[in-house]
Image: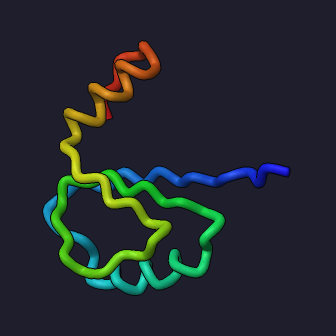
Amino acid sequence: MKKNKIVIIIPYFGNSLPSYFHLYLKTVEPHSEITFHFLTNIDYDGAIPENFKWIKSSLNEINTLITQKTGIPSNI
């Protein structure tokens, strides 16, 4: 029997991450049944859990992708 998969998409755009971001990543790690897709324009050189996918992108690129996939104009 195939197990359902949970994916949480987190858009985060700005100049920097919060100072507690490394603690947030520690809360994500034990939840291997959930994959977190983190869409951001920010660079990060720290360790990230296996179930956390860092997707470097601009807000314009995300808007274009949403519009292409859904056919609905996006302007986040």
Q: Colour scheme in the image? A: rainbow
* Residue 23 x %, y %: 41, 86
Q: Residue placed at 43% from the left, 76% from the top?
A: 49
Left or right of 7 in this view: 1: right
Q: Residue placed at 19% from the left, 43% from the top?
A: 58
Q: Residue placed at 24% from the left, 71% from the top?
A: 17
Left or right of 75 in this view: 7: right
Q: Residue 75 sits in which quadrant?
A: top left
Q: Residue 69 sits in which quadrant?
A: top left
Quadrant of the image containing the C terminus = top left
* Residue 32 x %, y %: 60, 71
Image vertical order of residue 35 relative to residue 18, above or below: above
**Extreme residue toward the right, this view:** 1
Image vertical order of residue 20 relative to residue 15, above or below: below
* Residue 4 x %, y %: 74, 51
Q: Residue placed at 26% from the left, 83% from the top?
A: 19
Image vertical order of residue 68 relative to residue 11, above or below: above
